[in-house]
């Protein structure tokens, strides 16, 4: 069974204080790892897809990296508007008709304070 | 801009009633999905569809059904609502099997 564990569950940072969020996974036949941002009362918003170990993606203050066992979301010099819950999901075979199943972690709730 | 619209955003109903949640997407995606999100659990797949007239069960499909009569809509029906189905429901769509899924803003459903 595919599993995704995110840590920490919650993280409080001061503005400008860089840190990393972790996503550990076990999966049979990884076909991609996704990072999403979720604001309160909203749906998950797609950030990145990583397909193979060693791959990195960047967007503004966020950088996602991938190894064979985990992914990190690095946040450099965060601002209050980066406050949100960050979700990680792994994609693997498992749906009828050849589709890929997404297994989500429970997220890291990030709060960035002035 | 393309989007996914879910309605209603909030609903309160009673156990035993039939409830239908709407999902409409303008991405023109063939693949559509329904998830539920509960505290302590990641998003869990209820049903999915690869195209018109196609529907498939996900990991938590008991008590739910979907129908796909056109590309844009995938309504989710709770046949006889139960308190265990109190949750936040999200609809999503994707262009391909391997591409990212795009989510609506959810329906918060309370069953009393």
Image (cartoon, grey):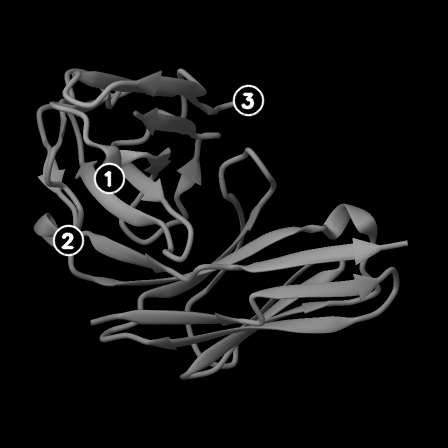
Labels 2, 3: front one: 2
Residue position marked by numbered label 2 in the rendering: A95
Q: Nearer the viewer, residue B86 or A7?
A: B86
Could you confirm whether marks 1 and 3 are on the same chain? yes
Residue position marked by numbered label 3 in the rendering: B1
Q: Residue at x 88, y 64 (%)?
A: A16
Could you confirm whether marks 2 and 3 are on the same chain? no
Quarter of the image holding residue B109? Answer: top left
Location of the N terminus of chain A by quadrant is bottom left
Q: Nearer the viewer, residue A10 or A25?
A: A10
Could you confirm whether marks 1 and 2 are on the same chain? no
Q: Is residue A11 above or below residue A52?
A: above
Location of the C terminus of chain A by quadrant is bottom right
Q: Residue at x 38, y 75 (%)?
A: A25
Residue A57, position as x, y percentages in the image: 60, 65
Name the chain under label 2. Answer: A
Q: How many marks?
A: 3
The alpha-carbon separation of the residues under discs 1 and 3 comes to 36 Å
Can residue A100 be seen here?
yes
Which secondary structure, mark 2?
A: loop
Name the chain under label 3. Answer: B
Residue position marked by numbered label 1 in the rendering: B84
Q: Residue at x 74, y 63 (%)?
A: A12
Judge the density around disc 1: few (<14), some (14-19), many (≥20) Cα neighbours within 10 Å: few
Q: Is residue B38 above or below residue B83?
A: below
Q: Specify whether B54 is left or right of B112.
A: left
Which secondary structure, mark 1?
A: helix
Which secondary structure, mark 3?
A: loop
Residue B33, position as x, y percentages in the image: 27, 37
């Amino acid at each position: 069974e595919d599993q995704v564990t995110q840590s920490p569950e919650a993280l409080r940072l001061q503005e400008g204080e860089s840190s990393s969020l972790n996503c550990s996974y076990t999966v049979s036949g990884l076909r991609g790892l996704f990072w999403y941002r979720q604001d309160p009362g909203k749906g998950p918003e797609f950030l990145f897809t990583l397909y193979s170990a060693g791959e990195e993606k960047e967007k503004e203050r966020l950088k996602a990296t991938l190894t064979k066992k985990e992914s990190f979301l690095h946040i450099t010099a965060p601002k209050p508007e980066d406050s949100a819950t960050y979700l990680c999901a792994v994609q693997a075979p498992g749906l009828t008709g050849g589709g890929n199943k997404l297994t989500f972690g429970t997220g890291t709730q990030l709060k960035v304070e002035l | 801009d393309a989007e996914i619209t879910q309605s209603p955003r909030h609903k309160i109903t009673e156990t035993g009633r039939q409830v239908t949640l709407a999902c409409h997407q303008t991405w023109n995606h063939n693949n559509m999905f329904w998830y539920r999100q509960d505290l302590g659990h990641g998003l869990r797949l209820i049903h999915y569809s690869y195209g018109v007239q196609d529907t498939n069960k996900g990991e938590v499909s008991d008590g739910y059904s979907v129908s796909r009569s056109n590309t844009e809509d995938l309504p989710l029906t709770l046949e006889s609502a139960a308190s265990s189905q109190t949750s936040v429901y999200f609809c999503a769509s994707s262009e391909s099997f391997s591409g990212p899924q795009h989510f609506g803003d959810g329906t918060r459903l309370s069953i009393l």
